[in-house]
Amino acid sequence: MRAFERREYIINKLHRYKKVHVADLAQDFGVSEETIRRDLDKLDKEGIAKKSYGGAVLNVHTNEDPAYSLRHSVHLDEKQMIADNVLGLINDGDSLMTDTSSTAFEALRKITDVKQNLTVITNSLVVLSEFQHSGHKLISTGGVLGAETNSFVGPTASYTLQKYNVDVALFSCKALSMTGGLSDSNEAESELKVLMQQQASKVILLVDYSKFDRIAFIKLFSFDKVDYIVTDRKPSEEWIDFFKEHQISLVYGSTE
């Protein structure tokens, strides 16, 4: 078993039992306790676990869903770089479905400024408000509006998304895991992202470096549903090989 597979097993165990013990994990894998401690060190640095005496406990923040205003201010430079990198994947006249992520919002800033005659279908109140005078066609999903998330969710939003077939689904998620796939923290939002993926000819996932090697509360879907991953910096060689195996095109780094 490779190191990343061992760590994924530990993550899954943390989500199930909320804590793990070094001695038990060493016995499970047939490795030294020092190897397990290194695994837990990495998970601690990534914010997934908090080391404790003799083991680790789950970091409770994996199932938190921060308010939009907070999400928008985190890793802003990285999100703007991702926005630059996604431009080449969008054509004039495209129809898009997009979520409420702050990364997708930054991408739309660039896209709507450069591209012509777009149709944008979204459950994001912020997108609808910001781009209402952009000259592009905006379609709201409607639904129940969340005060903290500034997003529409629920049956009405789901029904609207299923009415349209689009060129591009453009969204982000909270976590990427080689064995766990894509995951997020908000169940209602996650259901809409799955529908966006199903209705699109091309699926583009926007994620900054902090999302890699993590697992969040709600599983979205596997990597075989994704066509492009756009990020801000070169991932590890392990991830690059993984994307090649799954026939995912990777776009990263500075466009300058």
Image (spheres, rainbow, N blue to C red):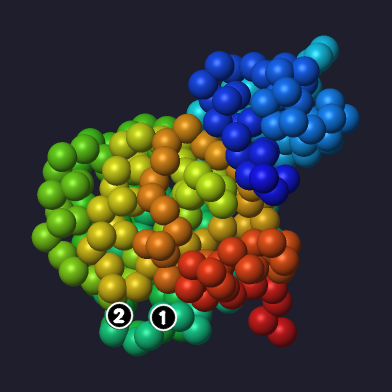
- State the image coordinates of residue 62 (x, y, percent, origin top left): 57, 31
Residue appearing at x 82%, y 12% in the figure: 53
Q: Quadrant of residue 234?
A: bottom right
Q: Callout 1, which amino acid?
A: Ile
**160 vs 201: above or below:** above
Neighbours of disc 2 within 10 Å: few (<14), some (14-19), many (20+): some
Residue denoted by label 2: 94
Where disc 2 sits, the SS reads: loop
Residue appearing at x 64%, y 31% in the figure: 10
Q: Which one is in front, 75 or 148?
A: 75
Total number of numbered labels? 2
Left or right of 96 in this view: 158: left
Q: Which one is in front, 129 or 242?
A: 242
Q: Which one is in front, 231 or 70?
A: 231
- State the image coordinates of residue 209 (x, y, percent, origin top left): 67, 56
Q: Residue furthest front?
A: 30
Q: Residue furthest top?
A: 53
- The reply to whether residue 69 is visible in this rendering is no
Left or right of 201 in this view: 1: right
Residue denoted by label 1: 90
Q: Disc 2 to disc 1, how far (Cα)? A: 7 Å
Residue appearing at x 48%, y 73% in the figure: 247
Q: Which one is in front, 239 or 153?
A: 239
Residue appearing at x 37%, y 54% in the figure: 99
Neighbours of disc 1 within 10 Å: few (<14), some (14-19), many (20+): some
Quick check: marks 2 and 1 in contact, CB under 8 Å? yes
**109 vs 141: above or below:** below
- State the image coordinates of residue 215 (x, y, percent, origin top left): 55, 39
Which quadrant, please, contains the C terminus?
bottom right
Which quadrant, please, contains the N terminus?
top right
Left or right of 10 in this view: 101: left
Q: Callout 2, which amino acid?
A: Asp
